[in-house]
Image: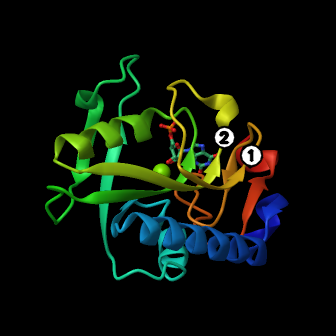
Amino acid sequence: MHQDVERVLYSAEEIAQRCKELGAQITEDYKKRGETPLLVALLKGSVPFLADIMREIDLKLEFDCMDVSSYHGGTESVGDLKINKDLDCSLEGVSVLLVEDIVDTGRTLSKVKSLLKNKGAKEVKVVTLLDKPARRVVEIKPDYVGFTIENEFVIGYGLDYKQWYRNLPYVGILKASVYE
Ligand code: XMP
Ligand code: MG
C-alpha cells in the first residue's frame, strides 16, 4: 500500500499534534460559551479524524454518525442530498459540531448544514482536518481547520481512492501510475 504513495503531506505525528491543538481550542471555546457540542461525523472519511479529535476534547459530549451522498446537479438545494444513514438522536436545540475529513467545493457541507438546521439544531459549527479553499464553489468557511492544502487529490487517514488507502496513518498524494 505505501509503495503507491508519491509523497507524505502530513505524517501521523503531525496529525496527532494538530488534533491536540484543535481539541484544546474547541474545549476552550465551548467551555467559554457554556455549550457542549454533539459531534456529527460524516461517514466514512471522517472516522479516523473523529476517533482522534474526540479524545482531545475535554467535554462530556456525545457523537453520532451520518452517511450522505450529494448529487452535484448544479443546484445547491438540500433536496440533492441523499441520506444513506440518518442520525440516531434528535437535534432539537442541539449545538452540532460537524466533523469532516475535507472541505472541497463546499457543496456537501453547505447542504448538510442546512439539513441539520432544518432538523432543529441550535447551531452547526464545522471542524475539518483538511481545507481545499482553491476548489470552493459554495461560499462556506469551516470554523476549525487542521491543515489548508493546495488543489491536490489526497488519500489516507480516512480519505480514499476507490475506497482504498483509508487506513494509511498519514495524508499523502497518490502516485499518478495508480490511476493512469
Ligand atoms: P465537497 O466538494 O462537497 O466534497 O466539499 C467533499 C467531499 O469530497 C471528497 N473529496 C476528496 N476525497 N481526496 C479524497 O479522498 C480528496 O482530495 C478529496 N477532495 C474531496 C470527500 O469525500 C469529501 O468529504
Ligand atoms: Mg467526506
Which amino acid, by three-letter code, is at mark 2?
A: Lys
- Vertical side of 147 occupied by 180: above or below: above
Element assignment for label 1: loop
Point 48% across, 70% down: residue? 50
Point 76% across, 53% down: residue? 174
Question: Which label number is shown at residue 149?
Answer: 1
Q: Toward the viewer: 31 or 174?
A: 31
Q: Does ligand 1 reach within 8 Å of label 2's beta carbon?
A: yes
Ligand 1 located in image quadrant: top right
> Looking at the image, do the residues carrying marks 2 and 1 touch, with CB atoms under 8 Å apart?
yes
Q: Answer with the quarter of the image where residue 150 lies.
A: top right
Q: Image check: 145 left or right of 45?
A: right
- Residue 138 visible somewhere in the drawing: yes
- Locate residue 69, reporting x and y percent: 34, 42
Q: Answer with the quarter of the image where residue 52 lies.
A: bottom right
Q: CA distance from mark 2 to mark 1?
A: 5 Å
Point 65% across, 63% down: residue? 156
Furthest-right residue in this view: 7
Q: Image check: 39 left or right of 26?
A: left
- Locate residue 83, reporting x and y percent: 24, 46
**Mark 2 highlights which residue?**
132
On-image quarter of the C terminus? top right
- Locate residue 56, reporting x and y percent: 55, 80
Q: Answer with the quarter of the image where residue 12 lies.
A: bottom right
> Mark 2 or mark 1, which has the lower sequence index?
2
Which amino acid, by three-letter code, is at mark 1?
A: Ile
